[in-house]
Amino acid sequence: MVRVRFAPSPTGALHIGGVRTALFNYLFAKKHGGEFLLRIEDTDQNRYVEGAEKYIIDSLNWCGIPYDEGVGKEGKHAPYRQSERKEIYKKYADELLEKGWAYYAFDTAQELDDYRKKYEAEGKTFIYNWSNRQQLKNSLALTKEEVQKRIEIGEEFVIRFKMPNDEVLKMNDLIRGEVTVDTKTLDDKVLFKSDGMPTYHLANIVDDHLMEISHVIRGEEWLPSMPLHVLLYRAFGWEAPQFAHLPLILKPVGNGKLSKRDGIKLGFPVFPMDWQEENGMLKGFRGEGYFPEALVNFLALLGWNPGNDEEIFSLQQLTELFDLERVHKAGARFNIEKAQWFNHQYLQKKSNIELAREFEKILSEKNISRPIEIIEKVVALIKERATFVSDFWELGNYFFQKPEKYDEKALKKQWKEDTNVILSEVAEIINHTTDFSSSVLEENVKKYISEKGYGFGQVMPPLRLALVGEMKGAHIFDIMEVIGKEETLSRLSAILKENK
């Protein structure tokens, strides 16, 4: 059975790259009728951030990619926080020691730092591995008695993996194909720390095995860890899962991975939801007004393609189409304009009543109350130009309030000697129109223009200025229908008084 996991660390807000990793795991699991797990990898307690775990869970739920098993959805492999599983890992570290795949290392942080400086002074790079482990303070260089004595007196130690130095390791990645590494170039990673906690490497492998993970789908930044992880499976005598390393999400401009700083500098979100930091609130996609389904659609196409030119896909369609073979090897450049385009597309697909209920909340904050039917009519007239629901006020505020001033440049251009007379006559026609629908109003005013022999430019621009205050807005007769006869006449009267 296909079982995949998303295993973030609760060290802050969930980056949008992490959301994409979770999404690809979710799509792969659902495509194959499998299960999607959430595991919280909190072995590094020094970097733990309060509230980060809840943020991760809330973000996945908001995006519509909930997990089947994990924190808060306990299954047979509980617990799902690594900090609650620490008693499990020591046993496996001891097993590696017994098999000769690991060893004790007593070197202090200061001693290792001194070694690094010494190597740097000689133009070299210090790597703790086969090339120097016999000269360092560890159980491979010390006698059994000395090792036992150090342990008994409580000297701090770590447990390191004994990396082989005579193998060209050939591994398979479902995205990148064959990956080859010479093990003599790798270091002896720490598996178990002096504080009694495992490192990511040991805990990750043990948990993936015990939780029966079939496929490890994770970011490209973990590709250098793949040799160690493959060898750990070999050391334990376990069958390794299949690996797939996703391409990075790149900065919009320049080189490198998309970061929080890019978002701050360029003014766009890189987190799914708002996140409070000491220095202030960082806006997320939800806070900026994105629909979760638009964000998911956008993220799915960052590094994957469906094999055709289509771009708009529901989550169900993405699930049916998703294939790791179509995930790119190269990084995917982040494009906020494309994210906005997706949101615009999804906004157009939503019903007017659904959007009206959202717009109603914005109006309520401005102490404006209108029947939902009126708001729905407004939404229908303005939504085509909107990217976010928050755009509705800027696009349609004139439906709810009189113009406080008139565009001076437009007024100077459009207001002629006969404009007062024309608008006064138009006001009379409007006043005598009983069927106050857009079509009837348009018919009556156009008939007046024709009978008088006026050009449309003599009537329509001043009329728009009267109702909107600027040369913008919806179809003029649609505006009249929505705001009603009384308000239409009131606005005409106001501009006539100001321009006597």
Image (spheres, rainbow, N blue to C red):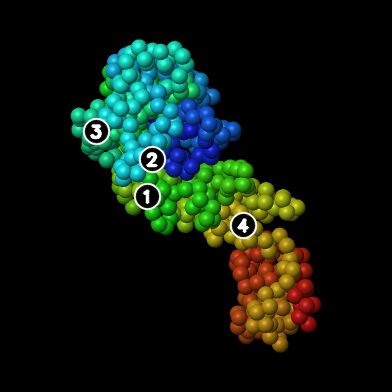
Q: At 36% from the left edge and 46% from the top edge, which residue is drawn? A: 303
Q: In which quarter of the image is residue 456?
A: bottom right
In front: label 3 or label 4: 3
Asked whether disc 2 touches disc 4, contact meaning CB atoms under 8 Å apart, the reply is no
Residue 366, image x, y percentages: 73, 54
In terms of sequence position, does the residue under pointer 2 or pointer 1 come before the other?
A: 2
Which quadrant does the N terminus fall into?
A: top left
Tell me the residue that label 3 is attached to: 184
Q: In this view, does 101 lie above or below 390?
A: above
Tell me the residue that label 2 is attached to: 117
In terms of sequence position, does the residue under pointer 4 or pointer 1 come before the other?
A: 1
Question: Disc 2 and disc 1: Cα gap in Å?
Answer: 37 Å
Q: What residue type is labelled 1?
A: Ala
Q: At 51% from the left edge and 50% from the top edge, which residue is drawn? A: 261
Asked whether disc 4 touches disc 1, contact meaning CB atoms under 8 Å apart, the reply is no
Q: In this view, does 292 lie above or below 193?
A: below
Residue sitting nearer the eye, 249 or 459: 249
